[in-house]
Image: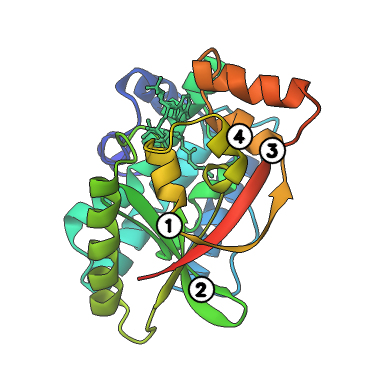
Amino acid sequence: MADLLAALVELAIPHEDIDEVLAIRLTQAQRAIVDDYVAIMARHMGLVQPTPPRFQPLPSAPRLFYVLVYAAALAQVKAYHRGRGVPESISRLTLADVGRNVAVHRQRTDVPGIDPPHWLQLHFCGTRYQIGRLQYEQTVQDGEPVLSIHIPTFCGPLSPAACDDSLRRAKAFFARHFPETPYQTAVCHSWLLDTQLRDYLPAQSNILRFQRRFTPSHSGRQNDESIQRFVVAGTPLHRKVIEHLEAGKHWQIGSGWLAI
Ligand SMILES: CC(C)(COP(=O)(O)OP(=O)(O)OC[C@H]1O[C@@H](n2cnc3c(N)ncnc32)[C@H](O)[C@@H]1OP(=O)(O)O)[C@@H](O)C(=O)NCCC(=O)NCCS
């Protein structure tokens, strides 16, 4: 790549990981995979359905291999954003999720990485955007176009004001830049919507206030892994998460919707 360093800084790769990425020497086969993956994202640019085939972990590749994949796809997604008139500030915030994922990986495991590698694909297909505190993915649910809300780490508290601001701006953003799809509903599928959290968090906590924005759409899906992945180990909330499991109970991915 012509200016890999500039791309890495733009993607918010943590400074302490940049030398490692610059030192990667790909084999011919790995270079072919990068080209193939960049081409897949180009083919799916702006395409809500079908979603692209999910990138898989490549055990023999360098641990920051996927940083190179996304850096190589930077120019094409920026061109798509420009074509849609997406403000540069939103484009940058959206694509900076690459570096955030590297940092989150270090927080979880003490080493940098990107896991799962497919998480950033939709950002680079131009169908997922970060607008203030929240991310919005263009998708289809039950035959209706909807925005699926994601909540990134390392973006400050999930305060009601930050969420109000994000939702207000998201409505205007999609009406302006994707006028062909009239989004009226946002959905969320997350451990944050597990109603059992009411037993452990104060009613005025950000998480429960966020939860109350949504009308539950169906009963939660049992999932003990997700909450353990997103709640930071060693914290008081993490201890409550574990106590719940030790009591023989399970956690869920809650689902809900709200009108935007
Ligand atoms: C979403 C998030 C920002 C909410 O944090 P918040 O705004 O502090 O939420 P609350 O105010 O409701 O937190 C209530 C308490 O739980 C703690 N808490 C909240 N989320 C926590 C987390 N992920 N890990 C550990 N503790 C957490 C808070 O520190 C607070 O503790 P305190 O009362 O001792 O101060 C936070 O959970 C987070 O960063 N999560 C990672 C991303 C994520 O889970 N995305 C959804 C994936 S499906």
Q: Earlier in the sequence, mark 1 or mark 2?
A: 2
- The amino acid beneath tag 2 is Val
Q: CA distance from mark 1 to mark 3?
A: 31 Å
> Dot 2, crowdedness within 10 Å: few (<14), some or many (≥20)?
some
Q: Nearer the viewer, residue 241 or 83?
A: 241
| Quadrant of the snapshot with the C terminus | bottom left
Q: CA distance from mark 1 to mark 4?
A: 26 Å
- The amino acid beneath tag 3 is Trp
Would the CB of label 2 be found within 8 Å of ligand 1? no
Residue beneath disc 4: 227
Which of pointers 1 and 2 indicates the residue nearer the eye? 2
* Residue shown at the point (30%, 84%) measured from the top left: 179
**Residue 41 shown left or right of residue 74 in the figure:** right
| Residue 100 position within the rendered picture, expressed as x and y whole percent measured from the top left | 39, 34
Residue beneath disc 2: 48
Which of pointers 3 and 4 indicates the residue nearer the eye? 3
Q: Are marks 4 and 2 in contact (CB under 8 Å)?
A: no
Q: Nearer the viewer, residue 133 or 180?
A: 133
Q: Earlier in the sequence, mark 3 or mark 2?
A: 2
Residue beneath disc 3: 251
Q: Earlier in the sequence, mark 4 or mark 2?
A: 2
Residue beneath disc 1: 124
Q: Is residue 18 above or below residue 81?
A: above
